[in-house]
Each structure stands twice: as structure tokens, then as C-alpha cells.
Image (cartoon, rainbow, N blue to C red):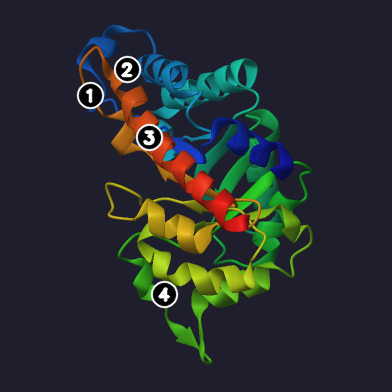
Amino acid sequence: MTTEQLVDQIRKKQSFLCIGLDTDLEKIPSHLLEEEDPIFEFNKAIIDATHHLCVAYKPNTAFYEAYGIKGWQSLEKTIQYLNENHPEIFTIADAKRGDIGNTSTRYAKAFFEDLDFDSVTIAPYMGKDSVEPFLAFQNKHTILLALTSNQGAYDYQTKTIEDKELYKVVLETSKTYVHSERLMYVVGATKASYLTEIREIIPDSFLLVPGVGAQGGSLEEVCRYGMNEHIGILINSSRGIIYSSNEKDYAEAAAKSAKKIQVQMGAELDKRKNLLH
């Protein structure tokens, strides 16, 4: 999927919502455990109920890998269902990969060719030769961890190196990579105060923003400081949507939660439109 297609979906749906499919057998409604593949059945129902309210889905692969081959098969079925039934939806493999070049190429093939995700999250710590193999894939996107929403982000990401915070070094260095135009970046909503300076470095890139809601991030602040002229943000919500109910009405409850966020996003887009005019 191209960035232009993603922006078009955002404008059509009046939403820049990404729903995280972090499916946990200990949290899904108990009646689903009787199904042959409870993870896929849960995901399918969530997708069916919410696809018109969001523009992206983001399965965190750890929630599938934890169940071995069965979990991986559930992930395969989920992405296949999305690609066959909702090809307009942007898909993100939240895998946080990143290794030496030939290994990164294999990771890229797994997510971009075999599973056919539109994007994958990457840890930048090993540098250029661990990132560029992902960038070699046309119409695919590499989402680099820049400034994350967790408390441990302060251990390294905001530390100063030669008068510059490490996350800024990551952003600036990544712009020199071959096909850097295919990069997106993870910036946590709890770090909204940093967005102004981040936009000075990467004004045109898309940002994937977790941490709104359960982790305390503000949708309004992220929009105020993070949006660019092409909107340029995807806000992820996982637990706050998919676990809105653990009863048989879980899909309907998820849709209600997603709708609430989508309405707020529509208002922010209208506000942005008015400011531009």
C-alpha cells in the first residue's frame, strides 16, 4: 500500500485509528475457547465489527508466537482474512525485528512476502545494515522505533550524546538510509511534548502513535503537535478497544469503543481543515 492510499482511507473514513490485535487467550471471552481456533475467531469478529472505523490493524506478533505453531497459524489466517476482505486496510506486523543484513532480509521476506503485511516495526539499535534490507521492498513500509511510550524509554532514548538526544540521532541518521522515504516512526503518545521537535526533523513522515487512553496519552495533544499537512499519524489502541467486554457482546462493545475514538478523530480532522482554511 502506498502512503497516498493510506491518506485517502483516512480522509474517507474520517479516522486515523489503528487497532492493535494483541489477542490473549486469558482475556478473550471464555465461550470462544471451545472454537478450533479461538484467536482467529476473536480477531475475525473484531475486524468484522470495526473495519469501517479504522484504517489499520496491528497484531503484536508476541501474542501469537507465545502459542507456538498454532499461534502463528492464527496470525496467518488473520492477515489473510484482512487482505482478502479488506485490502484497503493498512496492516502492521508489530514484530520489532532488527538484525544483521542477511538476517533482516529473511525477516523482511517473512512479513512482506510470505504473510504480505504492509509494514513491520523495527528496532534501530544495530543501525543501517539492519534496517535497509526492509526498505528494499517497494510499497512496503518500515516503522522505526524512535521514541516509545514505555517508562524505560528514558533509559536510552532521551539520553544526550554530544549535545543531542539519542532519539534525534536515530531520526536524523535514518533519513540517510537508501529508500528512507519508506520509513515511518513509532512515537509514543505519552511523549507528545516532544512532537514539535520531532516534526522539525521528519516533517513529512507518518508516525505510529501508541499510548493514547490506557497509557495516559492525549489524542488532542498528539494531533496538535504531530499532524502534518498530509495528516501523517496513526494512533493505535489495543486493550481499550478489543477488551471492551469479555462477554458474548465483545465485538459490539469493541465497535462502540472504536466509534467513540473515530468521532474524536473526525472532530480533529475537521479542526485541522478549518485551520488550513
Per the rendering, the mark at residue 156 is: 4
Q: Is residue 13 left or right of residue 242?
A: right
Q: Amino acid at mark 2?
A: Glu
Can the viewer see residue 102? Answer: yes
Q: Tell me which corner region of the image, top left, top right, bottom left or bottom right, holds residue 32.
A: top left
Q: Nearer the viewer, residue 36 or 12?
A: 12
Q: In the figure, residue 202 lies in which quadrant? A: bottom right
- Give, as a three-letter code, the residue at label 3: Asp
Answer whether labels 1 and 2 touch (C-beta < 8 Å).
Answer: yes
Do the numbered discs 1 and 4 sit on residues whose CB atoms are within 8 Å?
Answer: no
Can you tell which mark lies on residue 252? Answer: 2
Circle 1: is it few (<14), some (14-19), or many (20+) Cα within 10 Å?
A: some
User: Which secondary structure, mark 1?
Assistant: loop
Label pair 2/4, CB-CB below 8 angstroms:
no
Q: Are marks 1 and 3 in contact (CB under 8 Å)?
A: no
Give the class, few, some or many, for how many residues have Cα within 10 Å of label 2's Cα (few <14, many ≥20).
some
Q: Position of residue 133 (x, y in %)?
A: 72, 53
Mark with earlier residue (4, 3): 3
Closer mark to the observer between disc 1 and disc 4:
1
Q: Which residue is mark 3?
A: 22
Q: Which residue is mark 1?
A: 245
**Percent position of residue 40, x then y:** 43, 18
| Residue 232: image tag | none
Write the residue at 49% across / 67% down. Answer: 195
